[in-house]
Image (cartoon, helix red, strand yellow):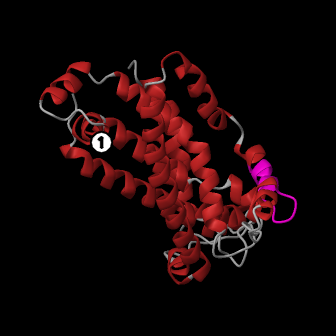
Amino acid sequence: MFALPAVALIAIVVLAPIAVVILLSFSNYSLGATDWSLVGIGNYAQLVHDRSFLNALSNTALYVSVVVSMSVLLGLLLAILVHGTGRLRRLYEVIFFLPVASTLVALGLVWKFMLHSRIGPINELIAALGLQRIDFFNNPSIAIFALAAIGVWHLVGFNMILFLAGLTGIPRDLYQAAAIDGADGFWDRLFRVTWPMLGPTTIFVTITSTITAFQVFDTVAVITHGGPAGSTDVILYQLYQASFQYFETGYASALTVVFLIIMMAISAVQIFAARGVHYS
């Protein structure tokens, strides 16, 4: 009985909308339409044969692989470096965490200016070095990697804080015991003590980073709009276009369901892979 109000709230706010989306995914409903009908798996069949969706799925997978791998590794490296800075630790924590606390839309506009091919400071520096300017957001070959770099920059501070919390919980006795056994170098301590003890933290950081990376939308909407030539089109941006530009609510609902299934599957695989991780 005590849990009933919370359960009812979750059912109304979370479960009921999900059920409505699943129902709409089997229909041809358009936003504002008074006449609609069920079409079975028609929307899902359209997804399978939709080249734009397959392209968005491929771009999203590429973006996620870059952002997750780099943000986790850089977050761990920064945490190790900041952990040993003594009195300046709090200052570094604030500096690296600032991008996390900022609005990604505003940051996207800043980065759009920073990486501009003609007036951007970074390209000015490249030109001053005698190199050819790089059109980061209008080159189909590198546009998705430019967005991924912004994603890494935005996420790495949060991962660093999580790894710092994990580092604080590692007993110093383990390092002393490792030194006695001859593992007193930086890399020996990292691979034999630090990273194994950070196993639970690494799994948590990887899962949260994957979920965050899959939700990429702001930078695409602000900077590239899915271009050039669809090279930065991602699942959430395609979902936004189907919902609020073309008003294809049924098709957008099918996109949403597929997106949720992908997220659940990836989280389940990561959790299953973490069964052998040692929790101290």
Residues 28 and 200: in front is: 200
Q: What is the secondary structure assignment of the residue under circle 1?
A: helix
The location of residue 87, given as percent across then percent down, is 53, 15
Image height of 100 relative to 37, above or below: above
- For image coordinates 55% across by 37% down, the residue present is 157
Q: Does 53 appear above or below 121?
A: below
Would residue 32 be visible to someone looking at this image?
Answer: no
Residue 135 visible in this rendered orientation of the protein: yes
Is residue 117 part of the magenta span, yes or no? yes
Mark 1 neighbour density, 10 Å: few (under 14) some (14–19) many (20 or more): few
7 relative to 104, above or below: above
Q: Quadrant of the N terminus?
A: top left
Q: Position of residue 170 (x, y in %)?
A: 29, 24
Residue stretch in magenta: 108-120
Residue named by callout 1: 187
* Kind of residue sitting beneath label 1: Trp
Residue appearing at x 82%, y 57% in the figure: 120
Confirm whether the magenta stretch covers residue 163.
Answer: no
Whole-percent x and y of residue 258?
49, 64
Q: Is residue 35 left or right of residue 87?
A: right
- Report the residue at 53% width, 45% height from top: 16
